[in-house]
Image: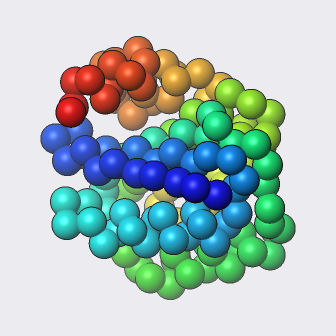
Amino acid sequence: MPANFSVIPERRLVYMKFFSDAHISECHATIAKVMAHPEWQPSFAILVDNSELTSYIGDFSEMQVFCRELEESRVFEGACVPVAYFAPSDLGFGIGRMAQQMLSASLPFEIYVFRDEMSALACLGQRELHLSALFAATS
């Protein structure tokens, strides 16, 4: 699963986009890169873009391991992290809902899943109506 991310410190926001085949190990690797970024803070909001996923490779037990590893890292301890998934397809929406159920049960995440980008952006307090406008305003 190719993925990329941007840390947007002036908005206290992390943008993560996943492409093609989703696998939980790639998600974990991407989050590790985000956490290593010098401008990232644990309280930054997270916008996950699942709009270009084509398949998901993984199972429930792998997601449990991923959740446990994040919890044991204690990186998010004391934070309240808003997370919004932009997931227009059924596949992306389902992955977002699975993450919502599992991650919010053990981590200080407030996770929401939306089929449209405007709602995802608004949920995180962003004034733009489209991702392209967010990128234009912050580049």
Q: Quadrant of residue 73?
A: bottom left
The colour scheme used to paint the residues is rainbow
Q: Quick one: quadrant of the N terminus?
A: bottom right
Work out whether 116 lies above or below 23: above
Residue 80 spot, x, y in % from top left: 38, 55
Q: Quick one: quadrant of the C terminus?
A: top left
Work out whether 48 lies above or below 116: below
Q: Is residue 83 left or right of residue 68?
A: left
Residue 24 spot, x, y in % from top left: 67, 66
What residue lies at 37% left-to-right and 75% top-to-bottom? 75
Residue 28 spot, x, y in % from top left: 55, 70
User: Residue lying farthest bottom?
Assistant: 72
Q: Is residue 10 left or right of residue 79?
A: left
Work out whether 78 lies above or below 131: below
Residue 51 spot, x, y in % from top left: 62, 34
Q: Is residue 18 left or right of residue 10?
A: right
Note whether residue 105 is visible. Answer: no
What residue lies at 48% left-to-right and 19% top-to-bottom? 118
Depth order, front residue of 92/77: 92
Depth order, front residue of 9/104: 9
Q: Quadrant of residue 27?
A: bottom right
User: Residue lying farthest top?
Assistant: 129
What residue lies at 68% left-to-right and 27% top-to-bottom? 88
Note whether residue 118 is visible. Answer: yes
Q: Is residue 129 left or right of residue 43?
A: right
What residue lies at 74% left-to-right and 31% top-to-bottom? 89
